[in-house]
Amino acid sequence: MNLCTCIQAESGGMPAVSPRTQPERNGLVPIDESPFIGETPQNSLQTWLTPNPHFYVRNHFSTPADIPSSWNLVIDGHVDQTLDLSLEDLRCLPKQTLPITMECAGNNRSDLQPKVPGNPFQSGAVSTAIWGGVPLSCVLERAGIREGAKEVLFEGLDSGEPEPGHQEMTYLRSLPTEVATHPQTLLAIEMNGETLSVEHGYPVRLIVPGWYGMASVKWLRRICVLEESYSGFFQTDRYIIENEDGTVDPVAQIKVKSLISWPNQGESLESTSYNVTGLAWSGFAHIASVEVSDDGGETWGDAELVGPRHRFAWQQWNFSWTPSRKGHNTLICRAVDEDGNVQPMETAWNRLGYIINGVKPVCVNVA
Amino acid sequence: MNLCTCIQAESGGMPAVSPRTQPERNGLVPIDESPFIGETPQNSLQTWLTPNPHFYVRNHFSTPADIPSSWNLVIDGHVDQTLDLSLEDLRCLPKQTLPITMECAGNNRSDLQPKVPGNPFQSGAVSTAIWGGVPLSCVLERAGIREGAKEVLFEGLDSGEPEPGHQEMTYLRSLPTEVATHPQTLLAIEMNGETLSVEHGYPVRLIVPGWYGMASVKWLRRICVLEESYSGFFQTDRYIIENEDGTVDPVAQIKVKSLISWPNQGESLESTSYNVTGLAWSGFAHIASVEVSDDGGETWGDAELVGPRHRFAWQQWNFSWTPSRKGHNTLICRAVDEDGNVQPMETAWNRLGYIINGVKPVCVNVA
């Protein structure tokens, strides 16, 4: 846990409030302009469902200028039959609807010490929507995956130089076949009951429940079944954790994490008891419990889990809090999932700044 | 079941398509203008979550022109302590979030034969949103319901003449105490992650899960605990079923019902197999099964239940259909809930036109 900000603030009175003062663009807090990247504002982290205009946007290249009217989704590679599906074809396949929390692998990157390069996300690169579409498995079944298939590669319509000087490329990511054929992996065409917007991947976005957002490829144009493992910039050069022993792990499923939605950092409170609210999530299992502490983790109290309970969506919680002292108070929360994964007190620092799931304090002033 | 329209249409070729051709206002199909009443368009019945601009609106009086800045919610009557709560007070109480399907008691009234007066709703006076707020039970606990309480009366800020010549009144409805104190009865302040709009009851709307919409009083101003049963225009003169034996039953919980979302009435189909989609709901229990028939109910096939499964929200379903004949086909569906309630083939006709839950055919033409 990084308590630096709070400790510094304590000596000088109230904690420093985030310096971000730019106006929201499209309802989002801007992180970058070219391509546009924006995070969910703090207020929208107080609700279970993230309204579409407040759902975080993380682009790797510019949004495709035109979706060709001839757009079709191609399924090819190691399959019995190449498919070429229109949006109308997809609408005729069995429908599925799922509430899914998506988190960017770099969410909370600005909390890392020492600082790392990359988009300086605060806590808002995480959002929840109800996605509607066709299970990818239905489409892959129709194509017929041949024996020996190892991975499925997904290609978006977006392209560019991933970094200055790099060769131009399209956005490409692969999944192990067993993840691609999981019955809840979706070809999404709807988001919160509305047709998917271009910003969020129209006409079709892959949605991989429980995985960090980089797996959920937008503007899908091609799905290719492979007999070997795919290597590429967004698969093996980025979205990896470099371990201290020199080994490398891919960024994959979302690790257990929680946040305090209310009170906000730096808030002045005036009454004697409060309902602290928050969210907790894990890509591995349902949330089993959330605990809250106001004494740096010496003692913990159980939060009450409330609201919708879904395997791949975050869990709301309430905690009734009566401060035992006036002035500066620091609240922390930590979550445990039903597989026994415990949110760590400290994030495992890594050079590229991914999976920042350590406990994050919120400092308030009680009058 | 009323197959009249289909049978007439069959002899003359394609069935008549609904005559409603007005443009949508605010995304809704208008039913009345003063006060505004609008239903959800057919397209939005193809999604599980109804986007806020497509959530049906049923007003009894004009929308209150101003919500006074001094607005407080008063809780009084047979309680230990009268409360006077601001919106800020409510935000500090424990939070709950629930997906709830709301249906107007007069939904599908235009299907009744013989015709009845009242708003001529087609199939769109039903919608689903994720409501966020404070359990009413939390507020009633703080007020302290005294022994002998029988009902809880809810008053909105809206008022007018309910019918020409009637005395002016506010909108008033009561609930039995055990329904008011049910842990899932909400004082809603959010709808689909957004602050409740004035159209939908800002600042606070009562949400009674599983009950027809007239119970979910908008623009709440007062909650009064009663020792006796309340009588009033919207309680005992309307929203009642007049039985043939002269007795009267109040309209209360939503009766089991289902609809076909796709194909639309009158659609021309061109391929050989289809995914028929729909929704089913009941205020009494989870949906247990949905069956589909293309031969007037002689034989039935089981639909697959998909998507989110919540006690008080509708259930999506898919049905794989291969027409056995070309030309005119009529599809029907019927739902059963987990309490064993079966959707009836025919609606029980009643003079005021409520609870129209009989099986409703959809006619299509297969090329």
Image (tube, coloured by chain):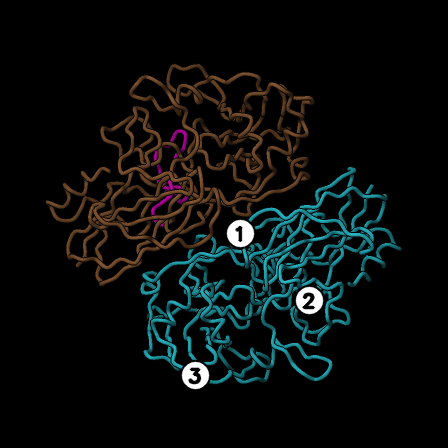
Chain colours: A cyan, B brown
Residue B306 x/y as whole percent: 41, 55
Tell which subunit mark 3 falls on.
A
Q: Tell me which residue sits at (66%, 71%) in the image.
A: A354
Q: Is residue A152 left or right of residue A50?
A: left
Which one is closest to the eye, mark 3 or mark 2? Answer: 3
Q: Quadrant of residue B287?
A: top left
Q: Amino acid at mark 2?
A: Ile
Q: Where is residue A78 shown, x and y percent of the image?
A: 39, 82
Residue A190 at x, y = what percent?
Answer: 43, 58
The percent coordinates of residue B256 (x first, y second) are 37, 39
Q: Does residue A134 appear to the left or right of A3 in the view shown?
A: left
> Which residue ends up furthest to the right in the rendered image?
A11
Residue, disc 1: A51
Q: Which amino acid, by three-letter code, is at mark 1?
A: Pro
User: Between disc 3 and disc 2, whose residue precedes?
Assistant: 3
- Would you say residue A271 sits in the magenta stretch? no
The answer to whether B41 is drawn above or below residue B90 in the figure is: below
Q: Is residue B329 left or right of residue B135?
A: left
Give the CA separation, mark 3 to mark 2.
Answer: 36 Å
- Mark 2–mark 1 Cα distance, whole angstroms, equals 24 Å
- Amino acid type, mark 3: Gly
Compared with B253, A149 (above or below) is: below
Number of residues whose C-alpha sits closer than 10 Å to that of mark 2, classed few (under 14), some (14–19) or many (20 or more): many
Q: Name the residue: 33% across, 70% down.
A: A85
Q: Secondary structure at mark 2?
A: loop
Q: Which mark is residue A356?
A: 2
Tell me what residue is drawn at x 36 percent, y 60 percent: A94
Query: Which chain letter matches label 1?
Result: A
Q: Is residue A94 above or below residue A35?
A: above
Range drawn in magenta: B24-43
The residue identified by callout 3 is: A148
